[in-house]
Image (cartoon, helix red, strand yellow):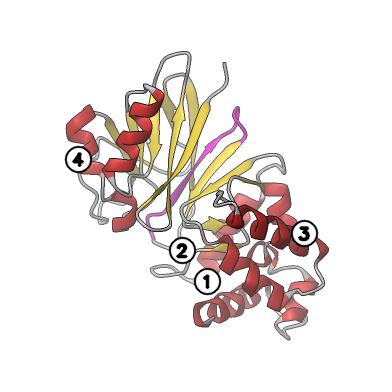
Amino acid sequence: MTAEIRLFTCLTDNFGVLIHDPATKATAAIDAPEAAPIIKALEREGWTLTDILVTHHHGDHVGGVAELKQKYTCRVVAPHDKTAKIADVDLRVGQGDIVKVGSLLGRVLETPGHTLDHISYVFDDEKVVFAADTLFSIGCGRVFEGTYPMMWDSLLKLRALPDDFRLYCGHEYTASNVKFALGIEPNNADLKARAEEVTRLRAENKPTVPTLMGAEKKANVFLRADDPAVAAGVHMKGARATDVFGELRERKNKS
């Protein structure tokens, strides 16, 4: 039996995600923006929370950890960087570590930049990646604690995943990301097609994720800072990919 995944809204624009192993009944929340929507989703499915897989220390990703831990006595898995304040951590993990959720195996990628402690969880058998605030659909996270070269390296790790992997991210930012990207690459056919899809989904009040990594590689300008077409779009023909990426992120910060 394959894993079951449920996506729902937390706070204002955060995504809550549950991944459930039917074989063992284990269920993990990817981050815990707030407890109530996660509890509601669990009760709706008849699942019990066994694990919380934390990606980074920002409050809108860990705000519900303490309440969920108290209610379910679940295991809290978090980045190995102990300087980041995350409550009730049971297991610290880093690059290459494997986290078990029942019989499901999640592989840890260190993806710093947005924060220094940021990690992503890759479930290879399920062809799913939970990238939180490192990679968004048609976007990427702000670089708060790291550097632009660091963030670019993290995006390259994610870009190396196969095209048929589904990307789940931490926020519903796709519409604004599309608007920005079209300003860089107005003639990108894949981006224009994604823009139409996003407009339709949001009009129907449906989430724009998950999305396929293959689609992101074609339409996400932040994943393609080493593409001459993207460099040309910011008037940096021949520049290093890290510099092009930095320019893209600076422009998005101001958009």
Quarter of the image that includes the C terminus: bottom right
Where does label 1 land, which residue? 148
Q: Nearer the viewer, mark 3 or mark 4?
A: 3
Tell me the quarter of the picture where residue 250 sits. Answer: bottom right
- Disc 4 marks a residue whose amino acid type is Glu
In the depicted view, which residue is nearer to us: 144 or 28?
28
Label 3: element kind? helix
Query: Residue under circle 2?
Result: 113
Q: What residue is disc 4 on? A: 67
Q: Residues within 10 Å of mark 4 (few under 14, many from 20)?
A: some
Give the amino acid at mark 1: Tyr
Mark 3 or mark 4: whose residue is earlier in sequence = 4
Q: Among all residues in the image, which is located at the extreme top?
A: 23
The residue wearing badge 3 is 193
Amino acid found under the numbered disc labelled 2: Gly
Residue at 59% in and 45% down: 210
Q: Position of residue 243 (x, y in %)?
A: 62, 78
Query: Which residue range is magenta in the image?
Result: 116-127
Task: Give me the residue at 49% from left, 54% from top.
Answer: 111
